[in-house]
Amino acid sequence: MNILNNWKMLDFVTRDGEALVCIEGRVYGNNPRFPSSSHIRTSPVMGYSLDSNSMVVMTRRGSEYLLGKPDPSETFAQQRLIRRLTRLHPTAEPGFNALESQLTGFSERETEDTVRER
């Protein structure tokens, strides 16, 4: 999978008024179309997935890019990108997956008792 480093989010609006988000950055990987460290702009981002601290974006053309370090001038780049994609594609954000949840214990009785005490 290709990795994008020094990336930033780009907002576009087409002539038809469609809002698009693309990613621009330096690509690293085994793609013969792009020599390593080439500066590229992706096709519009259609979705994403999160795995631990990694974010993978999927583009309209079917490519997937692992987002590495963002451009230093882009503060909170990943959070801003997630918010923007969620507004554009409400189904882009992954839903709750009980098997991958980090919740290690929960007691409904304890919660009910805590609510009654208040």
Image (spheres, grey):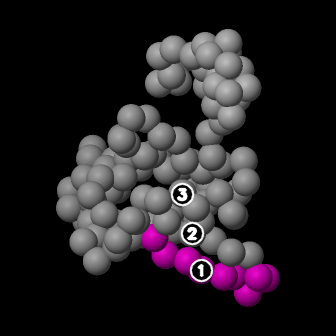
Q: In the displayed image of the protein, which residue is found farthest to the front?
A: 117
Query: x, y percentage for residue 41?
Result: 42, 69
User: How many C-alpha atoms fall within 10 Å of the one at disc 1: few (<14), some, or many (≥20)?
Assistant: few
Q: Considering only order in the chain, which callout, 1 or 2, is on the residue closer to the N terminus? A: 1
Residue name at image x 74 percent, y 76 percent: 18
Q: What's the distance in space between the residues labelled 2 and 1, CA to CA?
A: 6 Å
Residue name at image x 38 percent, y 47 percent: 66
Q: Which residue is mark 2?
A: 21
Amino acid on which disc 1 is placed: Phe
| Quadrant of the snapshot with the N terminus | top left
- In this view of the protein, which residue sits in the foreground, 16 or 89? 89
- Asked if disc 2 and disc 1 are in contact, CB closer than 8 Å, the reply is yes
**Could you say which quadrant of the image residue 16 lies in?**
bottom right
Residue extent of the magenta highlight: 9-17
- Asked if disc 3 and disc 1 are in contact, CB closer than 8 Å, the reply is no
- In this view of the protein, which residue sits in the foreground, 35 or 17? 17
Residue 108 in magenta?
no
Q: Which residue is mark 1?
A: 12
Which of discs 3 and 1 lies nearer the camera? The answer is: 3
Relative to 65, is 53 above or below? Answer: above
Q: Which residue is mark 3?
A: 82
Q: What's the distance in space between the residues labelled 3 and 1, CA to CA?
A: 16 Å
Residue name at image x 76 percent, y 82 percent: 17
Amino acid on which disc 3 is placed: Ile
Which of discs 2 and 3 lies nearer the camera? The answer is: 3
